[in-house]
Image: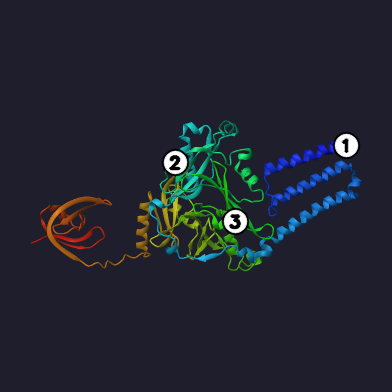
Amino acid sequence: MNKVKRTILIIVAAVIALGIYYYAALPPLNIHSAEIWVFAGILILIIAAIYIRRKRLNAYELKESKGLKVIMGIFAAGVAVYLIGALFSSPIVNAKKYQQLLTVETGEFTKDIEELSFDQIPLLDRDSAALLGNREMGSMVDMVSQFEVDELYSQINYQDRPVRVSPLRYASLIKWLTNNSEGIPAYIKIDMATQDTELVKLDQGMKYTTSDHFNRNIYRHLRFRYPTYIFNDLSFEVDEEGTPYWICPVKKYNIGLFGGVTIGRVVLCNAITGETEDYAIADAPQWIDRAFSADLLVELYDYHGTLKHGFLNSVLGQKDCLATTDGYNYLAIDDDVWVYTGVTSITGDQSNVGFVLMNQRTMETRFYEVEGATEASAMASAEGQVQNLHYTATFPLLLNISGEPTYFIALKDDAGLVKMYAMVNVQKYQIVATGDTVSECEEEYTRLMYQSGIKEVEEDTREIQTVTGAVTKIAQAVVEGNSHYYLMIEGSDEIFDVSVADYIDVIRYNVGDHVTIEYKAGEETNTVLSVNRAE
């Protein structure tokens, strides 16, 4: 009886240990998951240990025991299947399948990437956003002792604005114990263009987050609802009404047991209520921005670029092999977030053959054949312009400036604060403009493009027209530091713009004076070429 009790106790202890392991490690019950193979291996070894304990086998009996041989044979077979499955899932034997995981279209730069107004250009990188978020949190006296800002800072489009959002998290286990009944009360939202930072307070606190414990931890909550799903990196987003969600992509294995990972489904989890919605990736709501992580998209493109002529060529000859450059950034196009990165020769030269844009919601990928400097070269050029200030360049953002592919770079000081901006022409990276504001930088960049011949002054084909009459109204204004007089003439509703720098005598005219004006018609005002008193 004592022997039976001991056996039962051992089995119960083993089950409890396995339960604790499952609760802590959360392996998906899916044959494609390496974690479940590890879990199964541990289970088999525990069974072997119980068998040895139960039979009280000595060293000789261990070698001769048929039961133990069967158990260890199962373990060895599992290891063999795992290793063979890993090999036959790898690019070594499936180069063509890996190369075709991503469909790449050829895009037209000026057509696909419109010129952005300055108030839509994301001026901050993630690190700068984190500084602003922590500063905003530090000003919240009622919260800063209990919560801190999570490090997620997901970049999304929110109401047609590029923003980064990140939830708060409990500052410690003790703070969780004292606050978990109400949940996390707010999240940080940072406008990447205006740098406006807001702590968005919620009517109800978030109960399902990465900093929660036990069954309210978001990973455990998802595992128990979807025990077979293998999730990729989770991201934090808000819908158009500002409701916080966890976006939870589900991996899809397209090659063998463990290879060819893409995203097949996406689960949306309400961070406040824990309610979930499960969608096929093609049916996912358009407001979500990140089903495919940037790292996954970059990996898929690298397979596409390096495996054109097989695995051996990608390692040895490397003919026609292309790879993404080190780093990436984000562009907002048509209410979606696209990952941008350059494409260069796998041999690692100092120039790009083009760049790709990859949609984080749909996996749509476009290649643009624009030869030019790598991002690293552009960053070095920008830093060289302000080397006396020792500013550090952030990873570039690709913009369309007057039809020219242009690297836009923020320059930061040692404290991580953005101090200046730079624009570097992709194809002629010796053309570098800097400015304290984006508009100053753009003006200097445009001047340099005219000076270098990249842009030519368009011929003014407007006809010269003449009007004569009495001045009925005069108004003065300063435009870009230059004084202008705006005149209206009797019998006409047109406004005539006179530059004081060009026609100083305009200051002598008063309402009622008769003048003759030569001008070229414009959309809002007419450009005056000459103004004289009428005889």
Q: Residue at x 86, y 43 (%)?
A: 52
How far across and how far down the image is residue 46, in percent?
Answer: 79, 44
Label 1 with label 3: CB-CB less than 8 Å: no
Horizontal side of residue 102 vs 50, given as left or right: left
Provide the residue designation for mark 2.
198
Decide: is 321 above or below 334. below
Q: How is the image coloured?
A: rainbow
Sequence-first tag of 1 and 2 = 1
Report, in whole angstroms, how far the alpha carbon at label 1 lies from the one at label 2: 66 Å
Residue that mark 3 sits on: 263
Disc on the earlier residue, 1 or 3: 1
Q: Is mark 1 on a helix, strand or loop?
A: helix
Residue 95: quarter of image: bottom right
- Rendered position, 490 above or below 125: below
Seen from the viewer's position, the closer of residues 159 and 164 is 159
Residue identifier under label 1? 3
Classify mark 3: helix, strand or loop. Answer: strand
Q: Residue at the location (27% across, 66% down)?
A: 460
How many numbered circles are shown?
3
Mark 1 is on which residue type? Answer: Lys
